[in-house]
Image: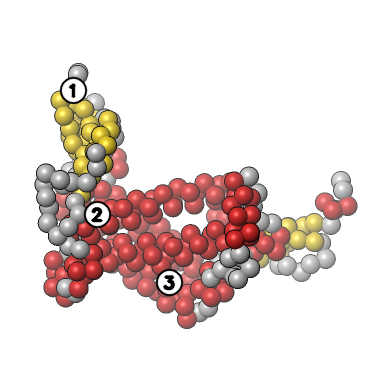
């Protein structure tokens, strides 16, 4: 064993506050229910438009079924691009039988085509998500979490540093020791973008699609260019959040699954420190 290895130990440090952990898990559950119930709502009319009205002959995105050889064919059209998505979008199998629907039953809540129930799930958890997000945002600003943990420092924003972080992530080299106590600039950028851009945008466009809320906040329709544009932005925003989730989970697994999960449950994160450093509890 080398002298370096003999003088390194693992220590547990505090990384996430109780409020951050609580709002994180409430968000995770809320977003999952919102996604599945949102796809149920989308299936009622699996087409998207731009503008204040539905120009039914000019959707920019549509999933539908056409007659094909040996059965139905699922088609997804994005602008001029036409894709065969049989088995997933447009046409899927349910109990061994082809079913015409936007997203398959296993990806919607409830699984059967039941718009009223999907809307109830969606609207209830939309309020849970919005209130939870407001609590997180207020605590991040007032409690210093935003300034202390999320805002990049001047050194982190240097182009050379950003490029180095990207290169390290491409090589699957993750921060260790003191650097692991803090979010790196890529994490900060992603979390800020999701928490303060994508999620608020999703909430506001969701409000714009509600006639009742439009009456109370008529400026929302002007802000997003009409209810149909708001629906499209809502769908795109939700898709970007799903993409963030998958990238986030890949990074969680590659950088240490148990260590990351433990930190979001107990708040404690294990790092390697020199044996003489009092960085926290030994693990």
Instruction: Using the numbered discs, state the Cα–Cα distance from disc 1 to disc 3 in whole angstroms.
Output: 50 Å
* Label located before the other in sequence (1 or 2): 1
Can residue 146 be seen at all in this image of the molecule?
yes
Q: Is residue 63 above or below residue 249?
A: above
Q: Residues within 10 Å of mark 1 (few under 14, many from 20)?
A: few
Residue 1, given in percent of the width and then of the height, sits at 86, 46
Q: Residue at x 34, y 66 (%)?
A: 200
Percent x, y of residue 62: 21, 42
Q: Which residue is mark 2?
A: 232
Q: Nearer the viewer, mark 1 or mark 3?
A: 1
Instruction: Identify the residue position indicated by label 3 in the image.
Output: 136
Image quadrant holding the C terminus, namely bottom right
| Numbered disc 1: secondary structure | strand
Residue 116 image point, x, y percent: 15, 53
Task: Return the residue at label 1.
Answer: 68
Whichever of callouts 1 and 3 sits on the residue coming sooner in the sequence is 1
Q: Residue furthest bottom?
A: 142
Q: Secondary structure at mark 3?
A: helix
């Amino acid at each position: 064993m080398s002298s370096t290895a003999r003088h390194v130990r693992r220590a547990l440090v505090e990384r996430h506050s109780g409020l951050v952990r609580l709002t994180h898990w409430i968000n995770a559950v809320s977003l999952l229910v919102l996604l599945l119930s949102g796809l149920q709502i989308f299936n009622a009319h699996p087409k998207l438009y731009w503008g204040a009205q539905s120009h039914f002959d000019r959707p920019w995105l549509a999933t539908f079924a056409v007659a094909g050889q040996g059965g139905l064919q699922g088609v997804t059209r994005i602008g001029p691009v036409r894709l065969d998505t049989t088995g997933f979008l447009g046409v899927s199998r349910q109990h061994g039988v082809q079913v015409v629907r936007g997203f398959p039953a296993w990806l919607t809540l409830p699984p059967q085509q039941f718009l009223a129930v999907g809307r109830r799930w969606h609207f209830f958890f939309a309020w849970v998500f919005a209130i939870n997000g407001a609590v997180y945002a207020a605590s991040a600003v007032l409690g210093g979490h935003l300034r202390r943990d999320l805002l990049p420092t001047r050194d982190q924003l240097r182009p050379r540093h950003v490029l180095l972080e990207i290169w390290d992530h491409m090589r699957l080299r993750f921060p260790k020791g003191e650097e692991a106590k803090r979010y790196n600039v890529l994490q900060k950028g992603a979390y800020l973008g999701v928490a303060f851009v994508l999620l608020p945008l999703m909430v506001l466009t969701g409000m714009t699609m509600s006639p009742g809320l439009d009456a109370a906040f008529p400026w929302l329709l002007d802000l997003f260019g009409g209810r149909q544009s708001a629906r499209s932005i809502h769908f795109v925003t939700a898709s970007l959040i799903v993409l963030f989730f998958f990238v986030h989970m890949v990074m969680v697994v590659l950088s240490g699954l148990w260590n990351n999960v433990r930190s979001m449950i107990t708040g404690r994160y294990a790092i390697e420190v020199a044996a003489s450093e009092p960085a926290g509890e030994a693990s």
